[in-house]
Image (spheres, rainbow, N blue to C red):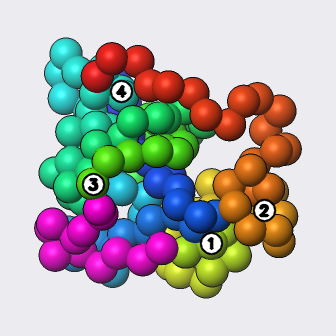
Amino acid sequence: MGPVDVVAGVIWRDGRFIATQRVRGRHAGFWEFPGGKVDAGESNPGALARELYEELGIIPEELRHWRTVQHTDGDRRIRLHVYHVTRFSGEPQALEQQALRWVNALEACDLPFLEADIRLVRELAGAADPAPGLAAAFDWVGRPLLETSPAL
């Protein structure tokens, strides 16, 4: 069986991003970037938009693909597509009773993130600049910070 495609968003505001805590399943209690499975026939950006609306009540307006990470969880192979979400409409809220926190990359390192996400958290922390704001944290990428998402 092939890998399961999953999307996640690093949702930014004022140099901080959203971390959510799982409430159900065998990974309950672990923190993660919001997102979920890509449904059949769905694009990755479309799946992310759907998941963020269902989980947080927000609609991503500017996003950029950052990384695709392969991960094995038990007998499941997961292909995690991670996006930076730099603009969105709506005010994030925990619609699935999950804990939600705005954290900077260093604060996130103190949370028990899922194994697939912890590498990304550590990378964000290593790249973070102590100056406030998204631009200070991500000039190292070497690409324009904001990229308008394709039609969802």
On whether residue 6 falls in the magenta region, the answer is: no
Check disc 4 and report the residue beneath it: 44
- Tell me if label 2 and label 4 are in contact, CB under 8 Å: no
Q: Measuring from the top left, give residue 48's x and y in whole percent.
A: 32, 38
Q: Which residue is at the front of the view, 131 or 2?
A: 131
Q: Which residues are magenta?
A: 91-102
Vertical placement of residue 66 versus 27, above or below: above
Q: Of callouts 2 and 4, which one flags the residue occurring earlier in the amino acid sequence?
A: 4
SS for dot 4: helix
Q: Residue at x 29, y 71 (%)?
A: 22
Check disc 1 and report the residue beneath it: 104
Main secondary structure found in the magenta portion: loop
SS for dot 2: loop
Q: Residue at x 28, y 22 (%)?
A: 152
Q: Of callouts 4 and 1, which one flags the residue occurring earlier in the amino acid sequence?
A: 4
Left or right of residue 2, residue 135 in this image: right
SS for dot 3: loop
Query: The N terminus appears in which quarter of the rendering?
Result: top left
Q: Measuring from the top left, give residue 101's x and y in whole percent.
A: 42, 77
Q: Which residue is at the front of the view, 62 or 18?
A: 62
Near mark 3 (Cα within 10 A), the count class, few <14, some 14-19 or many ≥20, is few
Q: Nearer the viewer, mark 3 or mark 1?
A: 3
Near mark 4 (Cα within 10 A), the count class, few <14, some 14-19 or many ≥20, is many
Q: Nearer the viewer, mark 4 or mark 1?
A: 1
Q: Which residue is at the front of the view, 80 or 126?
A: 126
Three-letter amino acid code at the position of disc 2: Ala
Q: Between marks 2 and 4, how big is the CA–CA gap?
A: 26 Å
- Tell me if label 3 and label 1 are in contact, CB under 8 Å: no
